[in-house]
Image (cartoon, grey):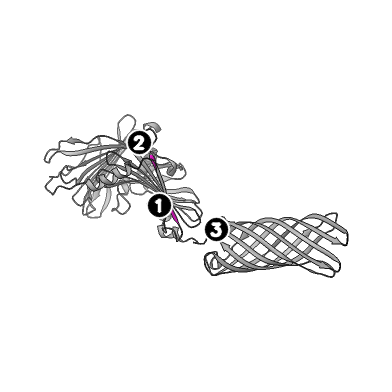
Amino acid sequence: MPASTKTMRICFLYCSCILFFCSAKLHAQKPHLDIKAPYSVSVVGAEQLEARSVTIGNVTELILRLPKTHALVQRNSTYDYSLTGGGQRNDLIYFNREKDPVYLRSVVTDQNAVPILAIEEIRVLKNVESGYKWQNMPGKQYAFQFDAGTKKYKDIAFTGTYKPQFVVPLFADNGEMISNTSWLDKINLMLSKKTFSETKPDDAYGDGGSAIYNYKQFPGFANIETETIQYKDLNGTVREEIYREYYSDGFMYEEITFYDCNGIIEHFDSSMYDDYGDEYEYTEMEYKNGQPVSGYRDIEDEDEFGFYDYREYYNPKTDRFERNVLALGDWNRYKAFQYERQSLKVCTNNPRNVIFIGGSLLREDANPGFNLYGGLIDYTRFLDTKIGITGDVRINAGSVGVTDYTKMNFMAGITYVPISKAGLDDCLTFSAHALVGVVNIKSKYGNYSNSQTAFNGVIGPRIDYNFNKQFGVGIQAELNPVFNKGGGGVSYNYGLATGVRYSF
């Protein structure tokens, strides 16, 4: 890459920042908005604009709208990096009547308020019409100007202090007046809930799921109501959590977190809604194995056209958001991890608690061999769609000649479902189990009786035929080694059981 580009990359990374949203514990943080009362701003060539200022973490948003139609005219975002030894970054965006950005300017200053980075663009129909990028390194300056013919930025000679290059557009409020009454009614309804909880049936993540609603006031603020909704699947696993803060000013802050089948975080995003219900996105984060791997902070959502110069991308090595390098940021990396909500629903709808009750036949390792008959009951709690923890109790009895035998087993271990097409939610379920525990063996001959305890185990497969999600039948075969005390060696017994299965 050219030396100038390398130098600019270093400078961009030098200007990297830590945002309020960048912690790996992102989804656990609950901020609150600092909302200023609306006020008027006079703009030459247009009516007075209504301004609302909102601060969340280290980001302050100044939103200017036409007071009659409430059309968005300007969004001014200021990032304060003083806590991390930096200066400020200011993003200024003007919008047309279709809510598309038509003028974008981003200026980064150091801790001494000296500009070190500036990007400006004028867009027509979402495409760059003209643009300018300026970078100030110690002792050197670089500038790039957009070439309308090649649709690329080209190096240009530049010296001096940065000054805005373009004139921003202005608007007149000549449309019909709109109302935000319905939105404010919704906010006020939420504010009235105070402390309240309820659980409702919900099939968002499969039949038999539920949604748990919890409402309470934000600690220390009587004018902020919080709402937490947890959507659970049939197994009781939280698959989606929505957290919202409702403000008496008509604003709302929202976080949405998605989880996989095992309750491990997959995706997080956060947004703010103004007093007309218009959304301003803040953060998108992707996770792998519960750890943040990619994300971005954006002025608009990812469906907008290519404002990548204004994005900050999450760097998992530094656990923070960083400015990209003249549109060479980690957008492709983000897309590599970008989640699909539908994939989160591909989970078994079967309950994770399974009870198996059956008759048991045990073939004893003796000379000659003999059979013991009885029954067993085991309970398995599946941790996910593959692995479960099993507890097992069984008793077998029988006679050989004039000697009566009774064996009682207490075991625990693991059940594994290895085949996805013969899983918990299929008509046929194939599983294998390995259990260890103790066995108490009693023998009685006339008036003489004896009892001893030894370690034992079972290992073997089972096939279940499921009539529905609750009831089924199954058959299992097992090897049952018993580790006899006193140097008695190991007895290798064989077992067979058939019975009914109940899932809940």
Q: Is residue 379 magenta?
A: no
The residue type indicated by label 1 comes to: Tyr
Residue 315 pos. (x, y %): 43, 45
User: Magenta span: helix, strand or loop, mainly?
Assistant: strand
The residue to which callout 3 is attached is 352
Select label 3 or label 1 by which is in front: 3
Which image quadrant for residue 207?
Answer: bottom left
The residue type indicated by label 2 comes to: Asn
Q: Secondary structure at mark 3?
A: loop
**Of the residues under marks 1 and 2, which one precedes in the sequence?**
2
Mark 2 Cα-neighbour bin, 10 Å: few <14, some 14–19, many ≥20: some
**Of the residues under marks 2 and 3, which one precedes in the sequence?**
2
Q: CA distance from mark 1 to mark 2?
A: 23 Å
Q: Kindly give the residue lying farthest to the top in the view shown.
A: 112
The reply to whether dot 1 and dot 2 touch (C-beta < 8 Å) is no
Mark 3 Cα-neighbour bin, 10 Å: few <14, some 14–19, many ≥20: many
Determine whether 161 is above or below 373 in the image. Answer: above
The residue type indicated by label 3 comes to: Arg
Of 465 and 136, nearer the camera is 465
Of 316 and 413, nearer the camera is 413
**Of the residues under marks 3 and 1, which one precedes in the sequence?**
1
* Start-end of magenta stretch: 209-216
Q: Is residue 213 left or right of residue 158?
A: right
Assign the C terminus to one quadrant of the image. bottom right
The residue to which callout 1 is attached is 334
Q: Secondary structure at mark 1?
A: helix
